[in-house]
Image (tube, rainbow, N blue to C red):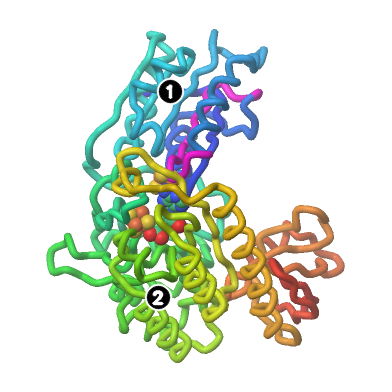
């Protein structure tokens, strides 16, 4: 087994929670082998990039960032002659050797299916020099079998599925993450119980589409069984992401009314409000179906906070299609919307579609949508003024150490003055009640009571 005593490392993570979670596993493995985590590339003997290619911008940036590392000197005390640089995650999976061909000082490339190979690849690069590339077509096991090093001790991500079978026509994820695979319910329960015993307050179940959990397992357990099982461990707060609208069942919706730990917030990506575009995206639901789900959710849990993802400028999107999207945002009243301009991904079906909407037209639609999103988020937050909400404290706010920041049940950011005699760090990971005095677009603020 590799031994990295005396070496320092840093992991740079891009992309979604899956990648962030994989990075925790990488940090866990490297720490387990004696390496010390540091925050900057300057201080690191080993630099690992966990990459994302869901949109083009991230892609281009990665190549630039790896290239610029060449000019960063290695720390004077390093036992190595040269910094070891590794690229993993979705670009590693997609590009493999193309990366080392283009970036000659890159030492290691690995993919999304073989996190566990990283230590051996790093060791080979340190001992033998040269390029070490390993990308596999599918995963043998779950990365959850690897150790983990989590940034916060009170919250944990718990993957229940990996991969995706949906093949939305714009999306590269199924090509770089492989087919959907579910983790046995007993494993999920065991890990959740371990977290509860370790004092974790909040678990977020992860998958590209958690709603289709279990279809590939013996006995076909359903996602609602996972929710019930994890709730039964006694966890304080339970969340999950992401939910595909075509697979969100009535049983899951009902849990927002009945399950003690399930928090009143749901990320339900709509992508577009136009049935024509939804069809071209291969989303397999209509706006009517989606609005029906929203209705049921609000009936089960009137106060639920809904968030979503929207793509503007999908090939062939007309002003009429965009208006359908605009109206659905008005109608649903999301508290948060992640808006993206369509980005062509080579190898996906949408990349072959006629895409002739002028850039300025798409940008104008995007800007109009963002204005609406902000207005609706502001409105959504106003209902909490005067209420007292339990806040899971994350630490000090970024700008001011005397202000604590945390999350409400609806996943809103909440700010409040740190009570006298305490520090934000003391309170991190604990629940405090905050009376909300003011609601802004992106956060609430109030006083600890
Ligand atoms: N599995 C999740 C998340 C997938 S990626 C889901 O289905 O919701 C996160 C978001 O990136 C997507 O919801 C989509 O809005 C956006 N996205 C994916 N591919 C894109 C592309 N080619 N261009 C622009 N946005 C994209
Ligand atoms: Fe991509 Fe669609 Fe799968 Fe989400 S459900 S990861 S958008 S293919
Ligand atoms: Fe990006 Fe890969 Fe996640 S492409 S969005 S990091 S699955």
Q: Give the range drawn in magenta.
A: 42-57
- Please give the count of numbered marks on the rendered protein: 2
**Horizontal and vertical percent position of residue 122:** 41, 22
Nearer to the camera, 103 or 319 = 319
Nearer to the camera, 127 or 277 = 277
Find the distance from the CA under tag 1 to the CA under tag 2: 39 Å
Ligand 1 shows up in the quarter that is bottom left
**Horizontal and vertical percent position of residue 168:** 32, 56
Find residue 252 and report its image quarter: bottom left
Q: Mark 1 points at which residue?
A: 3
The residue carrying pointer 2 sits among few (fewer than 14), some (14 to 19) or many (20 or more) residues within 10 Å by Cα, namely: many
Residue 445 higher or lower than 256, as above or below: above
Residue at 73 percent across and 78 percent down: it is 434
The answer to whether residue 393 of the structure is visible from this angle is yes
The answer to whether residue 236 of the structure is visible from this angle is no
Of mark 1 and mark 2, the one earlier in the sequence is: 1
Instruction: Report helix, strand or loop for mark 2.
Output: helix
Q: In which quarter of the image is the C terminus?
A: bottom right
**Horizontal and vertical percent position of residue 255:** 39, 83
Nearer to the camera, 233 or 74 = 74
The residue carrying pointer 1 sits among few (fewer than 14), some (14 to 19) or many (20 or more) residues within 10 Å by Cα, namely: some
Residue at 31 percent across and 65 percent down: it is 279
Find residue 6 and report its image quarter: top right
Residue 254 higher or lower than 341, as above or below: below
Q: Name the residue under label 2.
A: 231
Which mark is in front, 1 or 2? 2
Residue at 59 percent across and 50 percent down: it is 360
Residue 187 higher or lower than 73, as above or below: below
Residues tagged 1 and 2 counted as in contact (Cβ below 8 A): no
Query: 343 left or right of 96?
Result: right
């Amino acid at each position: 087994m590799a031994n990295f005593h005396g070496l320092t490392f840093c992991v740079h993570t891009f992309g979604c929670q899956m990648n962030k979670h994989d990075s925790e596993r990488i940090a866990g493995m490297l720490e387990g082998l004696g390496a010390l985590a540091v925050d900057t590339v300057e201080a690191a003997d080993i630099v690992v990039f966990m990459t994302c290619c869901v949109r083009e911008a991230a892609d281009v940036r990665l190549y630039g960032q790896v290239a610029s590392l060449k000019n960063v000197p290695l720390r004077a005390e390093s036992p190595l002659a040269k910094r070891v640089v590794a690229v993993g995650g979705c670009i590693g999976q997609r590009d493999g050797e193309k990366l080392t061909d283009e970036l000659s000082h890159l030492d290691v490339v690995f993919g999304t299916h073989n996190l566990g190979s990283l230590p051996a690849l790093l060791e080979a690069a340190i001992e033998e020099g040269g390029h070490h590339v390993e990308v596999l077509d599918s995963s043998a096991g779950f990365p959850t079998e690897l150790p983990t090093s989590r940034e916060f001790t009170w919250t944990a991500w718990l993957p229940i599925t990996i991969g995706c079978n949906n093949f939305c026509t714009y999306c590269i994820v199924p090509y770089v993450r492989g087919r959907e695979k579910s983790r046995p319910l007993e494993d999920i329960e065991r890990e959740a119980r371990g977290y509860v015993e370790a004092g974790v307050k909040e678990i977020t179940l992860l998958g590209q589409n958690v709603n289709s959990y279990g279809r590939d397992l013996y006995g076909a357990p359903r996602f609602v069984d996972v929710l019930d099982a994890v709730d039964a461990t006694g966890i304080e707060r339970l969340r999950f992401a992401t939910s595909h609208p075509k697979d969100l069942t009535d049983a899951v919706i009902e849990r927002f009314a009945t399950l003690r730990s399930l928090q009143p917030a749901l990320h339900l990506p709509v992508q577009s409000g136009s049935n024509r575009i939804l069809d071209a995206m291969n989303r397999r639901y209509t706006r009517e179906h989606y609005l029906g789900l929203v209705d049921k959710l609000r009936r089960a849990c009137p106060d639920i906070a809904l968030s979503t993802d929207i793509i503007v400028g999908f090939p062939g999107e007309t002003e009429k299609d965009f208006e359908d999207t605009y109206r659905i945002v008005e109608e649903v009243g999301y508290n948060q919307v992640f808006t993206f301009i369509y980005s062509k991904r080579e190898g996906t079906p949408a990349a072959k579609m006629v895409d002739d909407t002028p850039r300025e037209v798409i940008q104008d639609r995007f800007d109009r949508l963002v204005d609406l999103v902000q207005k609706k988020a502001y409105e959504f937050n106003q209902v909490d003024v005067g209420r007292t909400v339990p806040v899971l404290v994350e630490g000090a706010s970024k700008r001011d150490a005397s202000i604590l920041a945390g999350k409400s049940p609806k996943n809103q950011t909440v700010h409040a003055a740190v009570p006298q005699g305490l520090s934000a760090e003391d309170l991190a990971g604990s629940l405090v009640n905050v009376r909300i005095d003011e609601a802004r677009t992106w956060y609430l603020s109030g006083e600890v009571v």
